[in-house]
Image: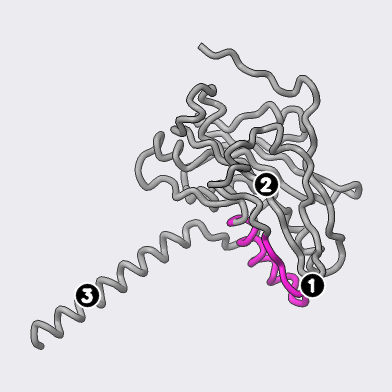
Amino acid sequence: MNLRISAVISLTALTGAMTSCVTQQQNLYELTAMPALDEYCLEAQRVITRTNVPMQLIVHKEFSTFVKSKAVIEGPTIHQYNWYDEEGMILGISCKMKSADHLLLQFGEGTAGPEGYCHDMNRQVYALVQRQATNPVYADVIFDPSESLDTKEQASMIGPTWLLPFTLTRIDDKAYLHVATKGFVIDFLDPRFQKFPPSWRGTHYCHLIAPDYLVRLLTGEARAGVTIGRAPDKGDYRVPATN
């Protein structure tokens, strides 16, 4: 075998090995099964911030305790709240999660990132849901890009604004189903927020569509046009003292 052919074969083998490695790394953050509801935000954290750092999750039954909660690096500890309709079906799931940059700062290179989007979780859930809803009633499903990490809306959003009601699903005049989300990131090292207490920084908040609701939408058993979210009550927020 001449050296030129040998070099080409070696390069091909190296490229194949690197591609396989990248694919395996990506697969670490792919959903292989529908997450249990009491672990939903743990899976969302893994998918959206590309991390396998172990987390503690608190699922809040009371809205007021969820409002007061903060995603903190101790644990790390993240939070979840479920939005129900009048019949008890979960429509949406809200997650207060850690940002990739704070996880990297705390746990080191390769433990998180790059930072993703709330719809990364919604899209992966939809891929699993399609196996159950094989004959969807909608011509297409569109994940509206209402969250962007570099828009003025995202940069100016704060917790109370994030919690306000918004329309989660709608149908357009082409009979396409639209799924919205509302999320924002406060990087721990973002110079704009250095005056904030540490527990307010290094966060990624997301509102996500619930899997069962998405299944029922696709099969025509549930209606689109619902809203989730709620304005916090007076006194729900307490601004901690700063040193």
Q: Is residue 108 visible?
A: yes
Amino acid tagged 2:
Lys
Q: CA distance from mark 2 to mark 3?
A: 45 Å
Q: Nearer the viewer, mark 1 or mark 2?
A: 1
Q: CA distance from mark 1 to mark 2?
A: 24 Å
Magenta-tinted stretch: 120-143
On the rendered structure, is 95 left or right of 242?
right
**Extreme-bottom residue of the structure:** 1
Amino acid tagged 3:
Leu
The residue at which mark 2 appears reads as 182
Total residue callouts: 3
Q: Residue at x 72, y 58 (%)?
A: 179
Answer with mark 1 or mark 2, whichever residue precedes in sequence: 1
Q: Nearer the viewer, residue 4 or 160?
A: 160
Amino acid tagged 1:
Lys
Is residue 126 within the magenta segment?
A: yes
The residue at which mark 3 appears reads as 11
